Image (spheres, grey):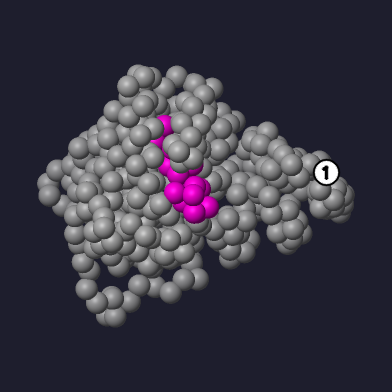
Amino acid sequence: MTKRRIVVLGSTGSIGTQTLDVVRQHGDQLEIVGLAVHGRVDELLSQAREFGVCHLAVGDPTLADDPRCDEGRTLVREMATASGADDASFGVGPEAVAALATLPEADVVVNALVGAAGLRASYDTLAAGKVLALANKESLVVGGDLIMPLAARVDAERRAAGLAPATGPAGALMPIDSEHGAIYQCLLGENVREVSKLWVTASGGPFRGRTRDELVGITPAQALAHPTWNMGAKISIDSSTLMNKGLEVIEAHHLFAMDYDKIEVVVQPQSAIHSMVEFTDGSVKAHLGTTDMRIPIQFALSYPDRWEAPVAPLDFRTLGTLEFAAPDTDTFRCLALARHAGSVGGTLPAVMNAANEVAVAAFLAEQIAYLDIAACVEAAMDAHEREGVQVVESLDQLEAVDRWARAFARSWCAA
Ligand code: MG
């Protein structure tokens, strides 16, 4: 059988390395044809050697003259010659990363880039007619109005050409997020018009149950310690503020074309239920499983099939209690801010996301306090709403709004 050929953007991050784990397990089904990283060149080269990958990109433009990049250029040429491949490439800079999204031999692009930088790669992937396996939720938060119509068009084209094995609920887009992967699976075989609610579950993060007063002196180390999921730094902070859940509400709105009043967040501290879908007859389907991101990553790559996964199955005899609670949006302001941004729509979520990225970086650098993250995001959103929220029209427009919001947030954090 022919293998699915994948490109992994962000291959040394948490999702990237777990994607490579899935490929190790299923080398008979998957083949990596391109890898991109931001700056970890040594790890990139060892991944390229292990998987025999001839197309590599390094996002950080300041590394263009780094001797390790020369080593990489030699490596891909040698591997291409040895394997009889037609060509090889080693690029440096954001455009080199984006170019991998359109690599002719790739079928699927796993976009695990961090932050709004992933949007252009998502757009380019779909514009090139490929399946987008999306871990970069900012792509949808910021550019969902552009991405989803494209995902629907690509899906229709691929099916007309006999390339798509099945119709999924999100066109040519496969979500790599435990909640959205769960909702996706609950929606299979269903009519979306008969959905009455999407229940997005949240662990509640490391500060669940605390008051605002108890969050005043929180340090980066405390906020990075997530109770149930093992993730990168940016998403761990977002999980602790519940901004991650806010981003996921917006993500769900775009992925499944669902109105915001039909998307509810519920705290489920054990993270055993990854999300639920409620139907008009009152039935609720829940997706449960071990908290291991390799499962949703694998599903995004195996769909419509399921493959074996080397993870410990959930043992209901020892699971104990499943708790549920409403989220505390007075303490965790970011969730309320994200719902507001999503409901207003247009360019407001882009402003929210950019301000949040800057504020989280400033908090990790100990330049602002923990509660300032939400305050900074709110200030940027207020300023943008006063100036006038725009209808989303283009990537260039979104990038301009993103730059404005970052500049605003940087000066807010410095003040
Ligand atoms: Mg998630």
Looking at the rendered structure, the secondary structure element under dot 1 is loop
The residue depicted at 35 percent of the width and 19 percent of the height is 388
Asked if residue 292 is positioned above or below residue 112 in the image, the reply reads below
Asked if residue 412 is positioned above or below residue 21 in the image, the reply reads above
Q: Residue 293 location, x and y as percent? A: 46, 60
Q: Residue 339 location, x and y as percent? A: 28, 39
Extreme front residue here? 415
Asked if residue 339 is positioned above or below residue 52 in the image, the reply reads above
Q: From which residue to which does the magenta span run?
A: 351-368
Q: Residue 150 location, x and y as percent? A: 47, 28
Extreme left residue here? 281
Give the main secondary structure of the magenta stretch. Answer: helix
Q: Which residue is mark 1?
A: 65
Where residue 120 sits, quadrant-wise, is top right
Determine whether, in the image, residue 280 is placed left or right of residue 44.
left
Between 150 and 261, which is closer to the camera in this rendering? 261
